[in-house]
Image (tube, grey):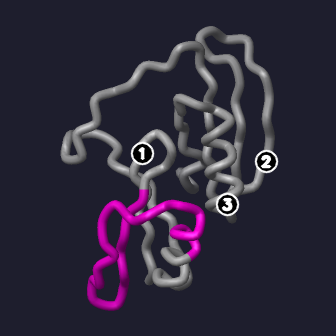
Amino acid sequence: MFKRIDHIEIIPRDFERSIRFYTDVLGFAMKQRMAVSAPPLEEIAYLALGDTVLELMRVKDPTLSAAEPWSTGYRMMALEVDDMDRALEYLAQKGIEPTWGPVSLGPSKRGEIHDPDGLPIELRQW
């Protein structure tokens, strides 16, 4: 009945900056972008990485939410990487440093970075 997660929605403060981060830095590809007339929603962009899709939503005057890392709710998305050390070296060249880790967890490695709005993104090497 249920097949997979179709997409994850993110409301960034700076729509264009977030598109550049996810496409230019993390390698997502623009799948579709369109204006939307459903105030406060103004525009959406679907970004694909493999079979994973993010929906970035431009809204008029987005508000900041108080983020507590251990509160109830969605915590973060995770991106699988081939090689943690190589991924972190690449990100450092783009000015992005890990906010946590990396640490070894048995046969895997785990680290974290933040997107331009401070949303956490886990990096996982299996």
Instruction: Name the residue that disc number 3 marks.
Output: 49
- Along the viewing direction, whichever of 75 and 65 lies nearer the viewer: 65
What amino acid is at disc 3? Leu
What amino acid is at disc 1? Leu
Q: Which residues are magenta?
A: 90-113
Instruction: Find numbered disc 3 in the image and state the secondary structure of the residue it sits on.
Output: strand
Q: Nearer the viewer, mark 1 or mark 2?
A: 1
Q: Farthest residue in the left direction?
A: 70
Residue at left 64%, top 59%?
Answer: 25
Give the number of the disc on residue 57: none
Instruction: Name the residue that disc number 1 marks.
Output: 119
- In percent of width and height, residue 68 lies at 22, 39
Q: Nearer the viewer, mark 1 or mark 3?
A: 1
- Left or right: residue 11 compared with residue 108: right
Instruction: Name the residue that disc number 2 marks.
Output: 31
Tell me whether circle 1 and circle 2 mark residues in contact (CB < 8 Å): no
